[in-house]
Image: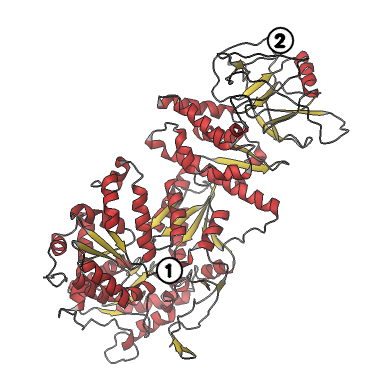
Amino acid sequence: MLIRWGHHFPNGCAFLYFPNKLARSFISLVGLVCSPILHHSISFQSSNLPSYINISSLSLSLSLSLSLLQFSFHHSQTLLLALMDSTATTTMSLRATSSSSSSSSSSFFSIPPTQKPNSLPFKLRTFRFRRHQSLKCIQSPPSDPTPKNPTFSCSAATLSPSPTSSAADDLAPSKLRRLASEFHSLTEPLDRVKRLLHYAALLPPLPDSGRVDANRVMGCTAQVWLDAKMDHDGKMRFAADSDSEITRGFCSCLVSVLDGAAPEEVLAVKTDDLAALNVGLPGAQRSRVNTWHNVLVSIHKKTKALVAELQGTPPFEPFPSLVITADGIQAKGSYAETQARYLFPDEDKVEELVNVLKEKKIGVVAHFYMDPEVQGILTAAKKHWPHIHISDSLVMADSALEMAKDGCEFITVLGVDFMSENVRAILDQAGFQKVGVYRMSSERISCSLADAASSPSYMSYLENASRSPQSLHVVYINTSLETKAYAHEIVPTITCTSSNVVQTILQAFSQVLDLNVWYGPDSYMGANIRVLLEQMTKMTDEEIAEIHPAHNRDSIRSLLPRLHYYQDGTCIVHHLFGNEVVNRINEMYCDAFLTAHFEVPGEMFALAMEAKRRGMGVVGSTQNILDFIKQKVQDALDRNINDHLQFVLGTESGMVTSIVALVRNLLGSAKSGGAKINVEIVFPVSSDSMTSTSTNSSSGLSPVKMGDVILPVIPGVASGEGCSINGGCASCPYMKMNSLSSLLKVCHHLPDETDTAISAYEAARFKLQTPNGKSVADVGCEPILHMRHFQASKKLPEKLVFQICNPSTNGKSSIS
């Protein structure tokens, strides 16, 4: 037997080449005294041996009987084990196959024989060992004591214990560290990419049976498949493949580290750990690195599922969802069925609404959170009457102003009361006092956030802010005009939205020296902003500059003690996305696209931010969520590959109408005969959800007396589940007070000069005055105008900066 020495082979994969019968006889003899150890097993039948046998992964541990072989290694020696002949005549075709004949073997890799005349029994290529290590191989009995065709197993996975190594070297973290050291040893980025491609060549192709939709990894630019099993020892076995060589290299690295590891080892490896591998891809290849992370997340998901199956743990019930295709919509679950019911509205109702809107020149502005029945009718009616707009709260007032300019005599507002107040005030400011503005209920349409901002505790919070020097109040737009006015007289105030709040705060800190920022009233958003800024302190200055050019790590650290937020205000909808929902998402949907409104609790925020870092999530406003879904669907269409995109909707379920309309439009515009794209929208509704049904949401609601306490009644969700007994609703009960019957009633009764039936529906002008004796409407609009200035110029207006730097002597802002 001869050993040929050669160049160092970097990843330690070891292959024996057996081209003739002598070699087969030799390895059969070795098999009699060898048994599998650690995690890479190779099974073969003595009558049909593969020509190449993989006998190691990251390291090798075999002990051969002295009657067969004796090796002695010196400090500078390297054992060279054959991988493949590099000549053009050699064909490599790896196959990963599960062995059913031996319980001790999980998979083997084979290369079809390429017989070579006068060749040695086997060839050896490089693998570097530590000093004075021995090869060990122990006999392994077959699973069947009397098999017809005896099988043998020989395995190799990691370096055996020696004076300089331990069993800890076999653990996934140790393998990952060695792999990271390997990549770090290559100083040139191009060399690291070449090494990645080298690993790609080692990955056995997945058979067609494994290249199925159930094994697809979501969120990858290339097609990636991952198969996972658990062997009889409770170790995880992974196989992966991709149509991209770079991605195959990623998969090969991950499989080499995690294949054969215990489930707890697999789950302990996090996406942040992969950064140490430093593969050297340029910034334009960020999507490839995201693929690496997404494959790891899929590995985690499959591992958790197999562990749960082994333990007999009942699987989580899937959340309800809607699957959108070019051909139609499929609803999964009763809640989804309820949402889908009105996506194809009654044509007679659509015609009725269009006729009255045209006749009386009525414009309609509605929030994304409307009831699906209303949104379905409005979406269909917009095709026949252009003055219908569904958006977030900020754009609603802008759209109403455009409708007034186009000649609409009335604006109907489908939202909560602060939205109709804003529309009324903006129209008055623009000189359209004669345009009527109408709400959709004779009752007060409240909002949990708006109520929090009008509470005495919030006023106390602002009084504390006024006593601090250089203070700015950043108030969420989801508050009443009255709150904005009163706040602005206590401390200089600027309005923000969920999409511009971070930029507003960062700009304010950069523009005003030693500024104190007081955000409110959404405590979840405030906490999320702080977490986001704390995460920025771990970024490089260059990365921070991409977010805001005036900041770096030092400036972010210095501003954190001067950032305050109100801690007693939440949105009833986004409160739903707490611990229970997050746990289920982690178990069942961790590999899906995650969308989250900035108002969600910290658990959901952290989950979505982690997904965002690997290109699989978005955190922001309702419009940000809609834009994200649009981009991902368009990307899938551009790739023109069959795909299933799954989005977890981390905001109010009323968004689904706009999402469905958007997705169907994209899928419908795609070329016929192209790829089949399915888009699934998942509603993370709490499992303890309950139903409260109302046939007429706009009817009067009487408070309930329980003992000496009188409890107000919050209107129930119009249909289906949605509200959790732990707090939070997938559908906003206040928004659902905007019913189709109310809209038709208001429209049919306009104009109302002689009709008092809808007088209570009109959005009245504020006649109140602030404590300083000024109009609530005038003062309340000023923070909104400050925000519009910031959006246009990316700077705080000079007037606001002056108010911050020159507060009045009694602690109140001097408003000119």
The reply to whether residue 306 is in sight is yes
* Location of mark 1 (residue): 380
**Residue for point 59% across, 11% down:** 5
* Location of mark 2 (residue): 1
Q: In this view, does 672 lie to the left or right of 522?
A: right
- Quadrant in the picture for residue 316: bottom right
Q: How crowded is mark 2: few (under 14 residues within 10 Å), some or many (20 or more)?
A: few
Circle 2 SS class: loop
Residue 300 picture location, percent across and down: 57, 46
Q: In this view, does 433 lie to the left or right of 12?
A: left
Q: Residues within 10 Å of mark 1 (few under 14, many from 20)?
A: some
The reply to whether residue 363 is in sight is no
**Residue for point 42% across, 76% down:** 734
The answer to which of 562 and 436 lies nearer the viewer is 562
Foreground tag (1 vs 2): 2
The answer to which of 248 and 484 lies nearer the viewer is 484
**Residue for point 69% across, 53% down:** 311
Residue 310 picture location, percent across and down: 70, 50
Q: Is residue 106 left or right of residue 483?
A: right
First in sequence, mark 1 or 2: give its number: 2
- Residues at marks 1 and 2, CA–CA distance in whole angstroms: 81 Å
